[in-house]
Image (spheres, rainbow, N blue to C red):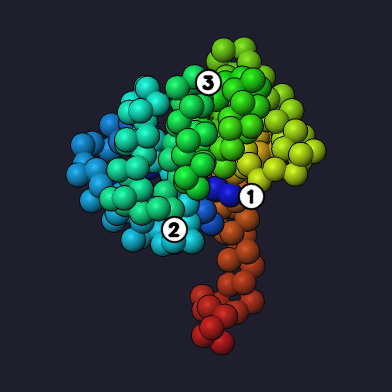
């Protein structure tokens, strides 16, 4: 089970790393736009320095033709590092680029997946992660859990190493359903993780524990006993 962050905000990443079990960082042009224009290669090198080699870094290409995708991918691998997962939308040209990159032993995250057919083709092409757009699929009356479950069964049956990555969530309920359907990982905005811990009942339990402790020992910590 992996939680990845949908952000390039270095201060936010640093804050989340101290709180949550984060396995990596994902980005795309829309995520970058939310943050603002950055010195692209320098900024992602800073992110890599912060998250370390043990966490994954997924960066999306923007060209639509295979030659352009490949040129961008090799530039990213050269100027950031060779462990970056190259994110590529599952289109005709995207599948072409994925297969070429896999022959060069690059790591690939197939993205913009809405259908089981896309997922199966990307898996056959050798993608390491499949980014399934959960909420967007629901908005289009496509069952994301069916796509995730069916693809997970195929991956397990063929003993493949492809990871199912749930993406595009509006709440933690969707995240939970994605995991239950067979997703190996999810990528979420930091706000969803914070919201997951903000139930009033959680704070009430903490307050009750504190009050019961204080009734016995006063306003001191265990370490101060």
Q: Is residue 125 visible?
A: yes
Contact, mark 2 vs mark 1 (Cβ under 8 Å): no
Report the residue at 48% width, 35% height from top.
100
Q: Is residue 37 left or right of residue 130?
A: left
Which sits earlier in the primary sequence, circle 1 or circle 3?
1
Q: Nearer the viewer, residue 3 or 128?
A: 128
Residue 167 spot, x, y in % from top left = 53, 33
Q: Is residue 141 above or below residue 17?
A: above
Tell me if label 1 and label 3 are in contact, CB under 8 Å. no
Q: For marks 2 and 1, give the one nearer the viewer.
A: 1
Q: CA distance from mark 2 to mark 3?
A: 27 Å
- For mark 2, does the 10 Å Cα neighbourhood hold few (<14), some (14 to 19), or many (20 or more) residues? some
Residue 15 visible somewhere in the drawing: no
* Element under disc 2: helix
Residue under the point 53% across and 78% down: 221
In the image, taking residue 176 as reference, residue 105 lies left or right, namely left
Name the residue carrying label 1.
1
| Residue at 55 percent of width and 25 percent of height | 113
SS type, badge 3: helix
Residue 16: x %, y % from top left: 43, 54
Q: Looking at the image, tell me whether mark 2 or mark 3 is earlier in sequence order.
A: 2
The CA distance from mark 1 to mark 3 is 22 Å
Residue labelled with disc 2: 17
The numbered mark at residue 136 is 3
């Amino acid at each position: 089970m992996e939680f990845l962050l949908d952000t390039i905000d270095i201060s936010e990443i640093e804050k989340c790393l101290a709180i949550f079990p984060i396995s990596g960082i994902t980005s795309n042009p829309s995520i970058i736009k939310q943050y603002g224009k950055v010195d692209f290669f320098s900024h992602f090198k800073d992110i890599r320095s912060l998250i370390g080699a043990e966490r994954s870094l997924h960066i999306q290409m923007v060209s639509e033709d295979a030659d352009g995708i490949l040129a961008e991918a090799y530039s990213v691998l050269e100027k950031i590092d060779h462990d970056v997962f190259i994110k590529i939308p599952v289109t005709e040209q995207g599948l072409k680029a994925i297969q070429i990159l896999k022959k060069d032993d690059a790591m690939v995250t197939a993205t913009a997946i809405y259908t089981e057919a896309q997922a199966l083709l990307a898996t056959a092409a050798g993608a390491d992660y499949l980014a399934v757009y959960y909420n967007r699929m629901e908005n289009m009356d496509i069952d994301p859990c069916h796509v995730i479950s069916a693809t997970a069964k195929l991956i397990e049956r063929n003993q493949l190493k492809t990871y199912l990555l749930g993406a595009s969530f509006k709440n933690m309920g969707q995240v939970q359903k994605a995991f239950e359907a067979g997703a190996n990982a999810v990528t979420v905005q930091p706000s969803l993780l914070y919201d997951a811990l903000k139930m009033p009942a959680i704070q009430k339990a903490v307050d009750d524990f504190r009050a019961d402790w204080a009734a016995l020992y006063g306003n001191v910590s265990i370490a101060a006993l």
